[in-house]
Image: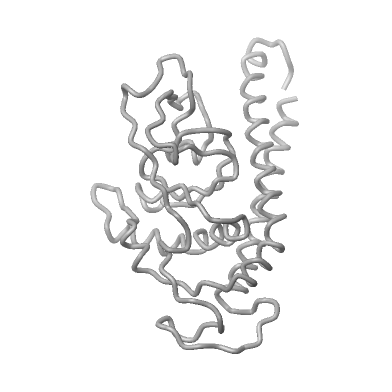
Amino acid sequence: MLSALDDKLELNRQTNATLEAIAQTIFKEWFVDFKFPGATGEMQESELGMIPKGWTALPIYETAEFINGAAYKETDFTPDNSGLPVIKIAELKYGITSQTRFSKTIKNENSRIDNGDILFSWSGSPDTSIDVFVWAGDAGILNQHIFRVVNGDTDKKYYECYLLKYLKPIFIEIARDKQTTGLGHVTAQDMRRIKIAYPDKKSIGMFAEKIGPIFEKSLNNSLQTATLVRLRDSLLPKLMNGEIEA
């Protein structure tokens, strides 16, 4: 049974890696190379150089609302793991584990997160902590040093997700330049300084039609993976006791 679970987990991982590669390829073709459906080649001058007509040179920080998580200290955590999990970088990487802390204290309603939320960890070791995630661990509370990225509509959400993922190498370099004692940061000021060619509404809508199913499929795979991991972990003690076979 456990081997079958591990096989399914690996299949989900490979599938999501393929979906991610497809989405990133489409994003670059449309919004970096400007080879999007219906492109006429008509361009306009901007501070970024020539960009498609109708698009705007916009700071990254103005493409969405970036809400920082709240600061939690030891006294905020419950001893019996009641309440909601407090989501730090470890949870973004590995999900909810036995090391996850819980709290009943909601310091900021905007720090609540749920499945499908886009999260941007902007502080930590540049090569291992600066990253963009789609949350798939159910309801939680966002800790500090992580932005919850909020958009006005779903179409913009899909665009924003892959925009931030595309810019990840730039964010890592920014964090490296500010690195002290092993840690680096990407601040709101940095995100106001960096500008991108922001598409018109029609292009964002077409991208959502193309990418939406890929995003949702990947999210569903991640949700299934989280469920399978919990099931596997619950079966491990029985395996150790000889109650079931691997």
| Rendered image quadrant of residue 200 | bottom right
* Colour style of the rendered protein structure: one colour
Quarter of the image where the N terminus is located:
top right
Residue 47 position (above or below residue 77): below
Of residue 124 and residue 210, the one placed in the foreground of this image is: 210
Q: Position of residue 166 (x, y in %)?
A: 52, 63
The count of marks equals 0
Q: Residue at x 69, y 36 (%)?
A: 224
Q: Position of residue 203 (x, y in %)?
A: 63, 72
| Rendered image quadrant of residue 24 | bottom right
Q: Position of residue 232 (x, y in %)?
A: 66, 25
Of residue 59 and residue 12, the one placed in the foreground of this image is: 59
Q: Residue at x 36, y 44 (%)?
A: 145
Of residue 70 and residue 145, the one placed in the foreground of this image is: 70
Residue 40 position (above or below residue 15): below
Q: Is residue 80 left or right of residue 12?
A: left
Q: Residue at x 36, y 38 (%)?
A: 70
Residue 37 position (above or below residue 148): below
Q: Position of residue 99 (x, y in %)?
A: 45, 26
Residue 135 position (above or below residue 39): above
Outermost residue toward the left? 180
Q: Residue at x 65, y 68 (%)?
A: 26
